[in-house]
Amino acid sequence: MSDFAHIPEGYHSVTPSLTSKNADASLKFYAAAFGAVEHFRLPDEKTGGVAHAEFRIGNSIMMISDEYPDYGAVAPEISKGGSFMIYVPDCDAAFEQAVAAGATVVSPPTDQFWGDRLASLADPFGYRWSVAQKVSSPTPEEMAEGMKNFGA
């Protein structure tokens, strides 16, 4: 039996891996919008692009690469990609930072029935992001009641 860890240090069991038409521009945007910190980049010497990069937002590591259509790695179209939720200390400030960096507003910061203050944004690369701040701890009964009016 090996002492080798099956999950690298600093990672979680699930690590999102994004594909972008321009991973370098995406990394710059995520740094400006969400405070992302890049900690590894493997350049593609053939294309001059990004073969693989890793960055951290808060305590979560994410991965990104440029498109490699021959291998099925293609960027999503706007709003047809995945979505991500980032818990932050101040939802309104995080929202304003992302908008200033060029994110498109999907929904402004609003208190939600499940206890979060939440705003949703779209990045220029096809992904949707929500920034959220825990502001209350409703009971399951209160959440069930809130769900009755959700979207009304």
Image (cartoon, rainbow, N blue to C red):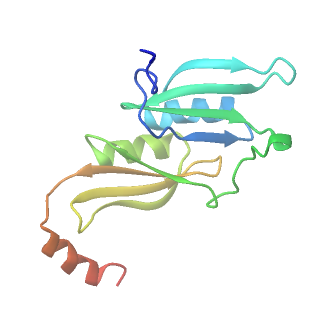
For the question of whether residue 36 can be seen, the reply is no
Vertical comparison of 6 with 90: above or below: above
Q: Is residue 77 visible?
A: yes
Q: Is residue 88 left or right of residue 96?
A: left
**Residue 75 in picture, x, y percent from top left:** 72, 47
Q: Residue at x 73, y 26 (%)?
A: 51
Residue at the (24%, 65%) spot, across then down:
114
Q: Position of residue 135 (x, y in %)?
A: 18, 54
Among the 4 quarters of the image, the one containing residue 28: top right
**Left or right, 124 with reference to 105:** right
Q: Nearer the viewer, residue 115 or 110?
A: 115
Residue at 27% over, 65% down = 112
Of residue 116 and residue 143, the one placed in the foreground of this image is: 143
Question: Of 71 and 78, which appears nearest the observer?
Answer: 71
Q: Position of residue 53 (x, y in %)?
A: 62, 25
Q: Quadrant of the N terminus?
A: top left
Above/below status of 92 relative to 30: below
Q: Residue at x 63, y 47 (%)?
A: 124
- Number of numbered discs on residues: 0
**Image position of 122 (left or right of 96):** right
Give x and y (percent) for residue 26.
Answer: 62, 36
Q: Is residue 5 above or below residue 93?
A: above
Instruction: In the rendered view, tell whether residue 73 sits above or below residue 42.
Output: below
